[in-house]
Amino acid sequence: MSVLESRNPLDQSLVGQVEYASEAKVEEAVQLSQLAQQKWAKLSLQDRSAQVVNAYQQLSAVAEELALLISLEMGKDRRRAGYEAQGTIHSAGYLVEEAAEAFRTETLGSRTQIQYRPLGVVAVISPWNYPLAMANNLIIPALVAGNSVILKPSEHTPLVADLFVKTLQKHLPENVIQVIHGEGDVGRSLVKSNINMVAFTGSVRAGRNIMATAAPELKRLVMELGGNDPMIVMDNADIKAAARFAVASSFENAGQMCTSTERVYVDRNIAGAFYREVVATARVYQTGAWDSPGVNIGPLANSSQHQKVVNQLVDAEQKGANFLLGESHYEAPFIQPTVVTGMTPDMSLESEETFGPVVAIAEYENLKEAVARANNSIYGLGAVVFGGQGAHEVAEQLEAGMVAVNQGVGGMGDSPWVGAKQSGFGFHGSKTGHRQFTQVRVMNY
């Protein structure tokens, strides 16, 4: 039996290992999932919902262990790892309720019903940056709809997913949810297998590969594919508030967040004051091990991600960028808090997703220029405007699935999590998002 090793990004020490799924193992999991799904789908929506809620409640017993594994496997600091574990558990109740409401049969007139039927087997392929939360947002609607689920987590965070799924398995019917481990070859085998849907969160490159693999059988897809989120700071913005947001959003989870602010465009008339506030705020942040006091930026989750950020910083320096804080070269596994000005369109820092604790800033002369640069991207997940009068009008011009004024993206209540352009294919969250895990059927009696 081959194994997949999980190593601590801080020092590369072995955290643990899991079985590396062979192609035969993937096929076996799919067959078992198909059998389990047939029985699961026959239960009432109410029964399925109750069982999912009960299973998630049992996760409380392993919440601390889940948080510890998040820290050990991807370097997230103790506080954030705890928030993710507890948030995953406590969000289950209302996510199940939202999903159940979305799947209830609707009646039109006296003879027509709109039914939301399960698709079959759903493959959930989840990332390493939020190894519980991102998987959870896809697993719950899939299960409540009457599908069975096979989770293929990131190869960088297998132990978190393994404990998560095995705990749920104890309180759900056999094989309704399974977990398999491996790298890209395992994901490809799963997508090629006799499943009915792929729900994926990850890179554009991986999303393209999944789409190509799923295309021959036209398998259903829901994919969130990352972002390169812009922020526009107008000349009438609250400079301190804008600076605090720019830093907090760029540094959250060591910058390893799909809706991190990646590109900041500030009005030239207030640029100097904005720079001073950004640097003063960024200096407060500390890097270190997940369990070190005061640390709020942990190590980057893996060496390839660290090298990607360094390459972007070196490219920016070579093309004339200024470093107000930090430098271009960092030894793994940390990227120190970094503030770069003079960002230009030919820098990879502007055109590519960074996924590191970097505030990258460019000045603009007029709002037309700022909007054009903000929209000049293949990505369109989130976008933010900070300003007073006229800010809403600027926000309306931004090409993103989620846009916010003087705050972070992500709506209140039953709002979808949605990307435009190449940041998304379909979406999840909200009644409409949950229903993408179903087959809509019109029944006339």
Image (cartoon, rainbow, N blue to C red):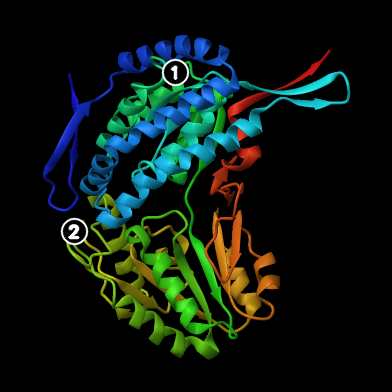
Which residue corresponds to the image point at 62% horizontal and 71% vertical from the top-left?
371
Residue 343 visible in image: no
Q: Quadrant of residue 32?
A: top left
Q: Give the quarter of the image for residue 173.
A: top left
In percent of the image, x 61 and y 39: which residue is there?
A: 433
* Rendering coords of residue 218 (x, y %): 59, 24
Number of marks: 2
| Residue assigned mark 1 | 193
Q: Residue furthest right?
A: 110
The amino acid on which the numbered mark 1 sits, given as a three-letter code, is Ser
Q: Residue 332 carries which label?
A: 2
Q: Give residue 171's position: percent from left, percent from top.
A: 37, 22
Label 2 Cα neighbours within 10 Å, binned few <14 / some 14-19 / many ≥20? some
Tag 1 and tag 2, C-beta contact below 8 Å: no
Tell me the SS state at disc 1: loop
Q: In this view, does 4 lie to the left or right of 376?
A: left
SS category of the residue bearing label 2: loop
Query: Which one is in front, 266 or 96?
Result: 96
Say if 263 sits above or below 165 in the image.
below
| Residue 240, above or below 174 | below
Residue type at tag 2: Ala
Q: In this view, does 173 lie above or below 356?
A: above
Work out whether residue 149 can be spotted. Answer: yes
